[in-house]
């Protein structure tokens, strides 16, 4: 797989929305909710800020990472893979690219959260060095499913 990782461009907003919507619809349904038509209305602003990264193959957006810098931490707000590529290792590939990005930016940690019921995602993040640092109900109050908060310390490079 010849993949490219880079910041999303404004012209890719529709592709970012498509990947996130197709990746997260089953997740949100397991939480007992549905995605509203305007659920990803914030994507354009996030792309403009430079907080959205894409994985492309042959010019097609197949993976999306929405990030937020929090002090010395890169928070992964969303990590979505096109359903046709789920299970192919693309999510892990994105996590490696995000770690490279965080390290090159001088950050010392990465963090994220996911629903506790999404055991396959917790296993993925653990394989990439994330540890559970807390559990709790979501701050948005839209459902009562426990979230798992995970973090990964980034050791200083010896290069």
Image (cartoon, grey):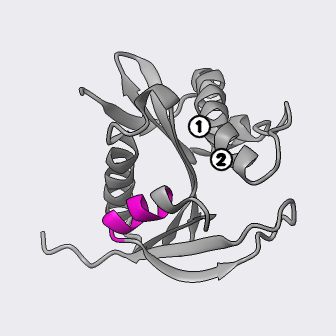
Where's residue 6, x and y in %? Answer: 41, 37
- Return the residue at label 2: 27
Q: In the shown orientation, is residue 90 left or right of residue 51?
A: left
In the rendered image, residue 125 lying in the magenta stretch gets the answer yes
Q: Quadrant of residue 123?
A: bottom left
Where's residue 70, x and y in %? Answer: 58, 70
| Secondary structure type for disc 1 | helix
| Secondary structure type for disc 2 | helix
Q: Which residues are magenta?
A: 121-129
Residue at 61%, 63% (x, y): give it: 117
Give me the disc on residue 83: none
Residue at 31%, 56% (x, y): give it: 100
Where's residue 113, x and y in %? Answer: 59, 66
**Which marked residue is nearer to the observer: mark 1 or mark 2?**
2
Tell me, yes or no, if residue 67 can be seen here.
Answer: yes
What secondary structure is the stretch in magenta mostly built from?
helix
Where's residue 61, x and y in %? Answer: 47, 25
Q: In the shown orientation, is residue 64 left or right of residue 124?
A: right
* Residues at marks 1 and 2 touching, judged by CB atoms closer than 8 Å: yes
- Return the residue at label 1: 23
**Crowding at mark 2 (Cα within 10 Å: few <14, some 14-19, many 20+):** some
């Amino acid at each position: 797989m010849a993949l490219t990782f880079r910041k999303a461009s404004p012209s890719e907003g529709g592709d970012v929305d498509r990947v996130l919507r197709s990746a997260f619809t089953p997740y949100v349904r397991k939480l007992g909710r549905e995605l509203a038509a305007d659920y990803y209305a914030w994507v354009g602003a996030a792309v403009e800020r430079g907080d959205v990264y894409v994985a492309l193959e042959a010019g097609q957006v197949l993976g999306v990472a929405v990030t937020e810098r929090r002090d010395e931490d890169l928070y992964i707000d969303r990590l979505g893979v096109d359903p046709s590529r789920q299970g192919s290792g693309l999510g892990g590939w994105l996590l490696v690219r995000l770690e490279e990005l965080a390290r090159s930016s001088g950050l010392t940690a990465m963090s994220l959260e996911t629903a506790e019921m999404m055991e396959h995602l917790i296993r993925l993040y653990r394989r990439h060095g994330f540890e559970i640092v807390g559990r709790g109900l979501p701050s948005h109050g839209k459902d009562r499913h426990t979230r798992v908060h995970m973090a990964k310390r980034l050791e200083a490079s010896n290069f």
